[in-house]
Amino acid sequence: RQKTMVNDMDSLILVNTYENRGYRMVEKILDTEIEEKVLKADHPVILDFWNQGCGPCQALGPVLEELSEEEKDIKFYSIRIDEGEEAVKRFRVMAAPTLLFIKGGTVKKKTIGFRSKESIAAVIEEQLRA
């Protein structure tokens, strides 16, 4: 966890970095868990590849958290690029953030860069509910 102090002493803001993710519904996973939790899952999965210090990654975190609370039938996972070298190679991740939309062990869609909640919801409808 990183602490950031704002000029106003009454405003102490604790900023969760992706190191601790800080989110309840988006589960951080390791390379070794990809096969079991993602590819063999009996439910649709959104896998978020992110990097610490990445502005678009930081902005995407709360969007995924909000969607994960609404989309109860989809499991949301995240993996840090520098901690998931095998997964990065396997899925040919070239930039952060990258989202993989996976159903039945197959990547249905890959997006790169920040996406709005509405954009991600549209991909969910198109690729994971079809």
Image (spheres, rainbow, N blue to C red):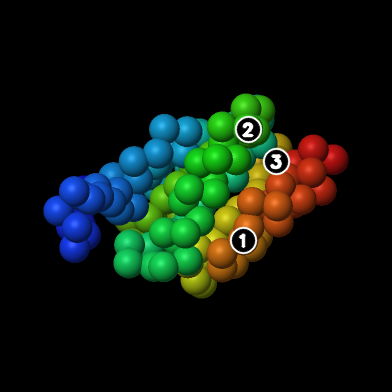
Pick out the residue farthest to the bottom.
94
Residue type (three-letter) at the residue carrying disc 2: Glu
Residue under label 3, please give it.
103
Q: Nearer the viewer, mark 3 or mark 1?
A: 1
Identify the residue at image location x=62%, y=27%: 72
Q: Which is more N-terminal, label 1 or label 2? A: 2
Percent from the top left, x then y, of residue 68?
Answer: 56, 36
Residue type (three-letter) at the residue carrying disc 1: Arg
Q: Is residue 119 left or right of residue 61?
A: right
Pick out the residue farthest to the right.
130
Percent from the top left, x then y, of residue 130?
Answer: 85, 40
Residue under label 1, please give it.
115
Quarter of the image where one finds residue 92: bottom right
Q: CA distance from mark 2 to mark 1?
A: 17 Å
Identify the residue at image location x=66%, y=28%: 73
Q: CA distance from mark 3 to mark 2?
A: 18 Å
Residue under label 2, please give it.
70
Identify the residue at image location x=70%, y=52%: 118
Of 108 and 115, nearer the camera is 115
* Callout 3: SS: strand
